[in-house]
């Protein structure tokens, strides 16, 4: 059971690894944890869910677990994870649980947990405490009474209106946009957002379906974006948008059907936020994406590198008061008056405003940012991860211009740089490499993979 409790959330195959019983006990344990932190007051905890086939029964188990601790439940229904964070933070609730397995295949489900302000409960801030409590099975004494369930159906609409209030819709051109929601939760906010914009939205896979009939809900994998890329070109659209299973990651495709790398989106966002908040801190994860750092420095911001992982980058952004943070996997975080968390609607609005400044096509505006060549994330199965990491360090470290062990090992040379990290849960090493030319990228990627896989 313990292996489903991961660094950022709980995730496992429904029925065998993650059951209603585990969901119920996790909810009770979270309620106990936050009650103790809040000095014993009666809590108001938010519960939301995605469209997976197993979500309704797991959600019911979560609600019952919270009620049996004497806490109140605010049931916000079918929502994206960013809307869940918004609901918790905006209305001053004490925390909550979101039933979702994000981009995982249909047989999976999971739980994301937060405290007040949408602050994540992660490996270092409570998930392992919950795991131990659920495993011990000794903390579930008398069921308490007094908790009530309230339902709210306004969270998705309110989240979109808040994004519009924050970013505005001024000067957005009447773009033609194709969006692929992968039959998942991004559809809920994209449809609501584009009702308020002068753009034409062409919907792909907007019907919520937990079997994911079109393709896997993971736009980080290029094969899942091919139909979108082709549709953008075929429809002569200005832009494409792809969202993942729970809608907390968002990707963009230019009018030529090419992915706009998250590092470039992050760099543009850094520019726009630094225009609004000069000299501010912008966070980004340690995987290569140097265009981000270039643009933060160009526009007078303070760059801050973080570990990989949405809860880890969020915690660092909160600690430093960063106005914006972005992860290479398509998570983009905005500092709002009530919290810092993923805000895909704000990112979409800002990006549309940015592209509306010029008469050039999106592809022509992006072209100058394509100055580095990225390998993508490449996984290798490795049994002795520590030994290989040591070998990489001893081979490349002595002649490097810079090294870091913030998260795995990062090595920098003047014309190429890379990060190698070990998976927390599998016998995998993950390589991300970037270079100043495609030829050098290919040569150095091959060289490193030969070392890793020897």
Image (cartoon, rainbow, N blue to C red):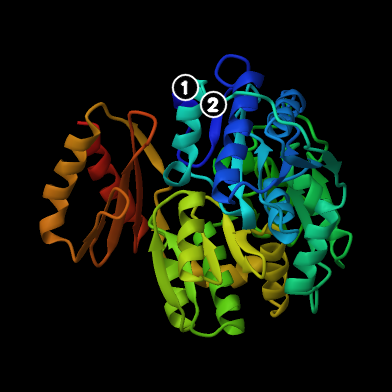
- Res 147 seen here: yes
**Residue 156 x %, y %:** 81, 52
Q: Which mark is residue 139?
A: 2
Percent of width and height locating residue 206: 81, 41
Q: Nearer the viewer, residue 449 or 338?
A: 338
How many discs appear?
2
Give 94 or 292, whichever is nearer the viewer: 94
Q: Residue at x 24, y 32 (%)?
A: 453
Q: For residue 136, which numbered disc appears in the image? A: 1
Q: Quadrant of residue 414?
A: bottom left
**As drawn, is 437 to the left or to the right of 283?**
left
Tag 2 secondary structure: loop
Kindly indicate the quadrant of the structure image that contains residue 198. bottom right
- Disc 1 is placed on an element classified as helix
The image's mark for residue 103 is none
Question: In the drawing, does residue 115 fall left or right of residue 129?
Answer: right
Q: Name the image quarter holding residue 79.
A: top right
- Camera-side residue: 188 or 444? 188
> Which residue appears at 28% of the width and 42% of the height?
446
- Quarter of the picture holding the C terminus: top left
Distance (Cα) linking label 2 and label 1: 8 Å
Residue at position x 70%, y 65% in the image: 346
**Residue 140 point in image, percent of width and height:** 59, 24
Q: Are marks 2 and 1 in contact (CB under 8 Å)?
A: yes
Mark 1 surroundings: few (<14), some (14-19) or many (≥20) residues within 10 A: few
Identify whether 62 is placed above or below 368: above
> Relative to residue 296, is residue 206 drawn left or right?
right
> Residue shown at 23%/63% (left/top)?
413
């Amino acid at each position: 059971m313990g292996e489903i409790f991961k660094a950022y959330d709980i995730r496992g195959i429904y029925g065998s690894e993650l059951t209603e019983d585990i969901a119920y006990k996790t909810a009770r344990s979270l309620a106990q944890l936050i009650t103790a932190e809040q000095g014993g007051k009666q809590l108001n905890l938010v519960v939301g869910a995605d469209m997976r086939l197993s979500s309704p029964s797991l959600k019911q188990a979560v609600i019952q677990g919270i009620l049996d601790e004497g806490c109140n439940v605010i049931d916000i229904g079918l929502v994206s994870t960013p809307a869940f964070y918004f609901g918790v933070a905006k209305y001053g609730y004490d925390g909550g649980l979101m039933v979702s397995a994000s981009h995982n295949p249909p047989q999976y489900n999971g739980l994301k947990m937060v405290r007040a302000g949408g602050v994540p409960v992660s490996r270092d801030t409570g998930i392992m405490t919950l795991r131990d409590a659920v495993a011990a099975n000794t903390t579930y004494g008398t069921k308490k009474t007094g908790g009530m369930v309230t339902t709210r159906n306004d969270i998705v609409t309110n989240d979109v209106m808040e994004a519009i209030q924050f970013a505005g819709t001024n000067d957005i051109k009447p773009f033609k946009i194709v969006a692929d929601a992968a039959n998942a939760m991004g559809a809920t906010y994209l449809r609501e957002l584009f009702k308020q914009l002068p753009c034409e939205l062409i919907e792909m896979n907007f019907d919520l379906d937990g079997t994911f009939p079109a393709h896997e809900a993971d736009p980080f994998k290029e094969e899942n974006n091919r139909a979108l890329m082709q549709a953008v070109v075929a429809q002569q659209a200005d832009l494409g948008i792809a969202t993942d299973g729970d809608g907390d990651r968002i990707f963009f495709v230019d009018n030529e059907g090419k992915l706009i790398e998250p590092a470039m989106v992050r760099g543009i966002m850094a520019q726009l936020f630094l225009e609004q908040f000069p000299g501010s801190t912008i966070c980004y994860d340690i995987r290569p994406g140097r265009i981000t750092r270039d643009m933060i420095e160009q526009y007078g911001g303070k760059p801050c590198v973080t570990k990989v992982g949405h809860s880890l980058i969020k915690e660092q952004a909160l600690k430093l008061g960063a106005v914006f943070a972005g992860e290479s996997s398509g998570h983009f975080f905005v500092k709002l008056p009530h919290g810092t968390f993923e805000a895909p609607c704000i990112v979409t609005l800002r990006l549309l405003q940015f592209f509306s400044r010029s008469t050039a096509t999106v592809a022509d505006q992006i072209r100058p940012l394509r100055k580095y060549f990225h390998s993508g994330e490449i996984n290798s199965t490795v049994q002795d991860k520590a030994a290989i990491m040591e070998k990489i360090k001893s081979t490349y470290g002595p002649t490097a211009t810079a090294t870091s062990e913030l998260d795995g090992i990062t090595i920098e040379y003047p014309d190429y740089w890379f990060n190698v990290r070990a998976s927390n849960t599998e016998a995998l090493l993950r390589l991300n490499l970037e270079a100043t030319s495609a030829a050098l990228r290919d040569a150095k990627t091959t060289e490193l993979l030969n070392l890793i896989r020897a």
